[in-house]
Amino acid sequence: MAQFGRTTEKPGINWERAFDLYVNAIACDNELLWVQATTKLAKLSKHAPEDLLARTIPVLVELLRGIPSTDLSPSIQEAAAHCLKCVACRGEGRLAVLIGESGAIPSLLSLLLHADGSLRRVLLKCLRNSVTFAAHNREIVVRHGGLEIILNLLNTCSDDLKRYLLEILSALALLREVRRTILISRGVCFLVEAARRGSMVSRCRAAQAIGLLGLVKRARRTLVDSGTFSVLLELLQVGDTSTKVVAANALGVISSHVDYIRPLASAGAIPLYADLLQGTDPMGKEIAEDVFCILAVVEENGVAIVEHLVRILRGDSAEAKAAAADVLWDLAGYKHLPSVVRNSGAIPILVQLLEDQNIDVREKVSGAITQLSYNEADRAALANSGAIPRLVDMLQDESEEMRDNAAEALVNFSEDPSLGDRISDVLNSPSFQNMQERLTQIRASDAYLAASLRHMNTEQLTMDPAALI
């Protein structure tokens, strides 16, 4: 029979013979032998071929479903659940899928309703592995009322079992209908706790579910009140790279509401996002850039963010410097922040970086300088830092983006009465003239649009678009 994948077979064991012996043991009318044989199978499962383990699943499920007939029956069910838990870890999820397809999950849930002690613990571990390694099993659990069972147990169980319940909940919460139920049933606190406790994989899932739930506006207040900020910020500190990215994204989703911008910054988010900006994960950098642009809406946050960006610009990492310059490019357009950028000492550093060896750094820096050149005080600071001759040289750069950025900035300098004479040498440059013409057209278009809007009355602005068809 074809194998599902690689195995870690224990040498010296005839697995076909071992499987026959196990089936024969279960066929005997001896429940003590069933427990012993199944316990032995669980120990050997990490070495056994996956195709053999697949053949044991129906046998184990039947033992799980067995009607109690003696005092040993709970022990048989416990041994079967423990063995299924071990099997579910094998095969990169394929065996967990087979467990779900075998009908094991309804039996696990049914037993869980009345089990206690060690049997309850093993049932929860088996259920946790089943939903961790096979996404389809999560739907089966929900379809058979498993979410309600888990939420009820979370309200009543002892603390030593809570970890397993939270890890199950974090897997189920990746389903949209589960998140809806969690919100309605006031179970958000459990989802937040799942992001605080358990394995890092489970905590990462919970953080992902929190981010998805945060897309629902009415859920954000509940998430914040349940302590989401502190939990996700902790993951940003102690998580692995993928966990940090997930937690950062979830925080970004929640912070997009104006009410939570100040609380998130006050909780210490800005330094952690600065660390993420300096990391190696491209998605993490992108998320950090987006969140900085949100947090900087508040001027005091902008001051702190720019300080971190200046520190990064002084560093050695080209990728980090490019990312920091990209954020400054955005922040330079905020009307309440130009003086913040100027007073931070960023401008002389940006001008120096126009000669950086890394093209991405130069492109992002040239964009930030172009944006700054729209402000009169910043133009003066740029000129005093030696930006003009460097921008003139950039008109000959191989990068079209840098030529365009340089030309746009120089057009702004040319329109400044106090600085225009410094760029007289480039007035006849094709790049400069093309950009000057483009900017003239853009400004004319903007002026026309603004005039058109001023002449529109309230009725026209509120008209149903369907009436125009």
Image (cartoon, rainbow, N blue to C red):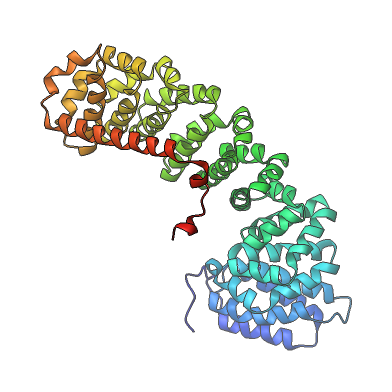
Up/down of 388 relative to 104, above or below: above
Q: Is residue 168 visible?
A: no
Q: Residue 168 or 262: which is nearer the viewer?
A: 262
Q: Residue 91 or 10: which is nearer the viewer?
A: 91
Q: Residue 449 or 412: which is nearer the viewer?
A: 449
Residue 366: x and y in percent read 28, 29
Q: Quadrant of residue 32?
A: bottom right
Q: Quadrant of residue 106?
A: bottom right
Up/down of 54 relative to 341, above or below: below
- The reply, left or right, for residue 238 in relation to residue 197 is left
Residue depicted at x 86% and y 68%? 114
Up/down of 208 relative to 418, above or below: below
Q: Is residue 118 visible?
A: yes
Residue 19: x and y in percent read 62, 82
- The reply, left or right, for residue 330 in relation to residue 262 is left
Residue 199: x and y in percent read 64, 50
Q: Count numbered badges in the picture.
A: 0
Residue depicted at x 47% and y 70%? 6
Q: Quadrant of the C terminus?
A: bottom left
Residue depicted at x 26% and y 16%? 416
Q: Residue 148 or 466: which is nearer the viewer?
A: 466
Residue 394: x and y in percent read 18, 28
